[in-house]
Image (tube, grey):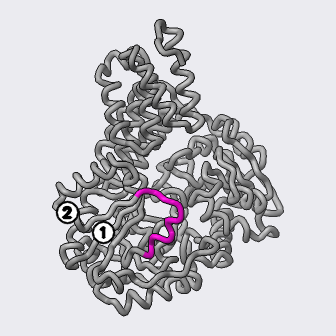
Amino acid sequence: MKTKLTNIDEIFAAYEEALADWRSGNLDEARRKTGHIRKFVAGFPKLSLLEAFIARDKGEFLTELDILRRCLNDEKQCKERNAGLAAEAWSMIGSACHELGNVKESIDAFDRAVALEPDPAQRRVEASNLIFAANSAAAFTSEDFRALYNRYEALLTPIMPFPRRKLSHERIRVGYLSADLCGHPVGKLILPLLERHDKTRFETFCYDASEKNDSVTEKLRAASDGWRNITSVSDEEAARRIYDDEIDILVELGVHTKGNRLPVLAYRPAAVQICGIGDVRSSGLSCVDYFLSDVWCAGDETSTREDFTERVIRLPHTHFCYTLPENLPAPAPPPSLSRGFVTFGSFNNASKITDEMLSLWNEILRRVPESRLLLKHKLFGVEEGRRFTKERMRRLGFDLSRLELRGFSPGHIFEYADMDVALDTYPYTGGMTTFEALSMGVPVVTRYGARHGTRFGYSILQNLGLGELAAPTAERYIETAAALSADTELLTALRSQLRGMLLDSPLTNAKLYAADMETAYETVWKESGKGDDAH
């Protein structure tokens, strides 16, 4: 890169060099180069976005927000020159606020991104981001979500469904569509089903929208009868491939999470279309027939009906199946035995930790003298993230001497040895973190409500035989955590027994899970008329 940039061509050339460094993961060099360019140019919104991307990838979300807000200071000019760029900036603000647990700001930012985005496909992505961000908003009602669903579905109206037709196969053809067919929690949770499908009754296809390829990907590929990579193809082309494969039942695993391919379902490539596993709420789409759940998450036939536009499949045990990692270390004794004080903890995503949740945790600390709170997330791995979190918790009345923040690190599973009791989040509960804690002998206390997305921890604990650790109110949540922490004998027993309880439960019984899923598939297929005029 030249020492002095004297014209626009040299500035753009320098920008391309910095962009290449960022794409290759060389963040420090990319930052050095963008800083050099800044000496010669004040404007340049694309450079601001690159600076923001670098900060994001370093986990510096506050720096990212500062860059983006400066970029949007002259919003009118930015929109006039490049509405797409302004929309991308607001989308990044939404994501950064989400990482910081600023739910309202995240929702507002994604809302602006939807309004500004000129590209129809990307506008759908932003509308989906908005719905996902709202999962963490405790105050959002079913009516609020329905308004977001209607807005999203309106963006799909230009899509024309494929012609209906009759299908006849010896085996039911099930397709799994996902951007997470890899070492992502969704890939890990769906693997036991793929490996144990009854091949005499079912033929399975995977539609992979992920750019990742790891050991889980290879296991999923080996377990499926057909594998189609749709990462770089349009939604219409992806739908066409599913249609040509004559899929009977299509299961979209992402719902409104990152990388989802929900617009594919608007083409109606399969006779029966199901969503679930990857997200906690409805797709909100009329083209989706069913949502996958279980008797604990969905409750009775009416309790969560308002949450869904789909019919709910209520599996009799659990709608996810966990596989314990290989070579897990033996659970350590409760740390309170040697330390003389109780340590509560949460390794959940910081985006799920609302101020309301922190206030409950603070009350638990007040009721349990000398206790500590251990939090672990990538946000806490950088100085600005720790500083932001401490200031946030100071405002909420925390005694910071009783707080420990840890960033991401290899072998995090060993760090459950430093925790006596795990505290789940609300209204967006943990999933994989709950399983990990339990597998290491750490009991989890969760809160649940009427909303489907609040009941994942409740379902896990009920399947484990520990439903008493799931609380229906905030006060019960506090009381349950405090009482459990005081029972040293129970904590010690659970430390040695929880892993065995997990292995003996429906939560890890892949054979039972596959049988339950296959029964559900045959039921919905029968309800569809076995293909007669259904496709």
The answer to whether residue 413 is magenta is yes
Q: Return the x and y of residue 30 as percentages of the image width and height.
A: 50, 31
Q: Is residue 157 left or right of residue 360?
A: right
In the image: residue 93, left or right of residue 533: left
Q: Residues within 10 Å of mark 2 (few under 14, many from 20)?
A: many
The residue that appears at 49% across and 59% down in the rendered structure is 409
- Residue 361: which quarter of the image? bottom left
Q: Residue at x 45, y 25 (%)?
A: 34
Figure check: 248 above or below 296: above
Circles 2 and 1 in contact, beta carbons < 8 Å = yes
Callout 2: SS? loop
Give the residue at the far top of this rendering: 7
Indicate the amino acid at tag 1: Leu
| Residue to which mark 1 is pinned | 373
Q: CA distance from mark 2 to mark 1?
A: 10 Å
Between discs 2 and 1, the one toward the N terminus = 1
Q: Please report the residue visible at 55 percent of the width from the left and 16 percent of the height from the top.
A: 13
Rendering coords of residue 339 (x, y %): 32, 81
Residue 411 lies in the magenta-colored region = yes
Quadrant of res 323: bottom right
- Can the viewer see residue 141 in this picture? yes
Considering only vertical position in the picture, is 432 above or below 133? below
Query: For the view shown, which residue lies furthest in the front direction?
Result: 3
**Image location (x, y in percent) of residue 141:** 31, 54
**Numbered circle sitting on residue 398:** 2
Q: Determine if residue 351 is in view.
A: no
Nearest to the observer: residue 473 or residue 174:
473
| Residue stretch in magenta | 407-417
148 is higher (above) or lower (below) than 482: above
Callout 2 amino acid: Phe
Q: Which residue is at a point 48% across and 77% down the rendered structure image?
A: 438
Considering the numbered disc 1 on the image, is that residue within a helix, a strand or a loop? strand
